[in-house]
Image (tube, grey):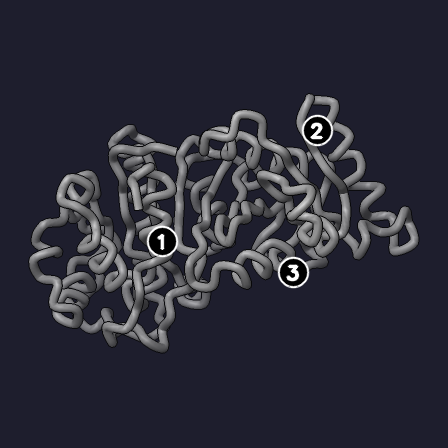
Amino acid sequence: MTASRLALSLGDPNGIGPEIVLKAAAELVPAQRERLTVFGPRCALEHAAQVTGLHTTLASLRLREAGPLVAGEHQPGVVSAAAGRSAVASASAAIRACQAGEFDAVVAGPHHETAIAQAGIRFSGYPGLVAQVCGEPEHSVFLMLVGGGLRIVHATLHESVSTALARLTPELVVNAALAAHKACRAMGIVEPSLALFGVNPHASEGELFGPDDQRITVPAAERLRAMGLQVAGPQGGDALLADRATRPADAYVAIFHDQGHIPVKLLAPQAASALSIGAGVLLASTGHGSAMDIAGTGQARPDALLRSLRLVSGWPT
């Protein structure tokens, strides 16, 4: 993936987003920093500059005020509706600017879902927000985690297992797989291979553990193969991942949130990138949260944000 102009939103301004944005920018060469425009409240960045001493870095950044906070609303480490509203507003502004052609991709800082919920905003993660802002169906945009040598796309995300199972269809799984295939090709993989997790343990062992795989993942795999794609499975996720040494896949399709998140976060703790794929706007974010326990202390590391920036930009490490 190569993007020359990036819109970078702060995420939750009361979290570590402002701090890691400045620290990441400080590690970029001037020519790379010039391609960034930061979206978010200035007061949060100014406070981060005081904590980190990166006043010169802040002065070198283009800033577009978005999701402004009034006096007293910027409180590092505090979960609040104002901060949640700001995170969604700054990311939405960056997505709209990218959709308008001003930027090639969006990189978003970590959000806090409780803060967004306190603001009364319906939010299921950045993929849903990309879909909403771009006016596309929510089921057409998916999350792909990249880290630890894995690429895992999620057919469902932030919802209960029962809710996810009720809306799972072969079409949804096929769409997730096609989005993963397209994203892998954008990363330079000419003929991506995919592997499909099952719904139930051992992909249901026929129907021993229920009819769900015969209803959902088996027909999805058949349709994908009929399209000419290389697809392994459906199979239990543990078996597919255990076979990586002998039968690696370029991307895996997880059915539920934890199926995909656990292996990536085990292999790449605090260092994974999250891609919202399937829409006209590409958004990358950190694979970790807003770390309210250390927000405003200067302890946060920018590793995951730097990886996300480099993943979509093609900039060297």
The kind of residue tagged 1 is: Val
Choose mark 1 or mark 2, whichever is in front. Answer: 2
Mark 1 or 2 closer to N-term? 1
Dot 2: element: helix
Residue at left offset 62%, top offset 45%:
155
In this rendering, position of residue 316 left or right of residue 230: left
Q: Which residue is mark 3?
A: 160
- Above or below for 98 versus 108: above
Q: Which residue is mark 2?
A: 224
Quarter placement of the N terminus: top left
C-alpha separation, residue under disc 1 versus residue under disc 2: 35 Å
Report if residue 97 is visible in the image: yes
C-alpha separation, residue under disc 3 versus residue under disc 1: 22 Å
Dot 1: element: helix
Q: Nearer the viewer, residue 314 or 294?
A: 314
Mark 3 or 1 closer to N-term? 1
Q: Which mark is residue 88?
A: 1
The kind of residue tagged 3 is: Ser
Dot 3: element: loop
Choose mark 3 or mark 2, whichever is in front. Answer: 2
Place of residue 174 in the rendered image (x, y in percent of width and height, measured from the top left): 67, 34
Place of residue 145 in the rendered image (x, y in percent of width and height, measured from the top left): 51, 49
Place of residue 142 in the rendered image (x, y in percent of width and height, measured from the top left): 54, 42
How many C-alpha atoms fall within 10 Å of the one at disc 3: few (<14), some, or many (≥20)? few
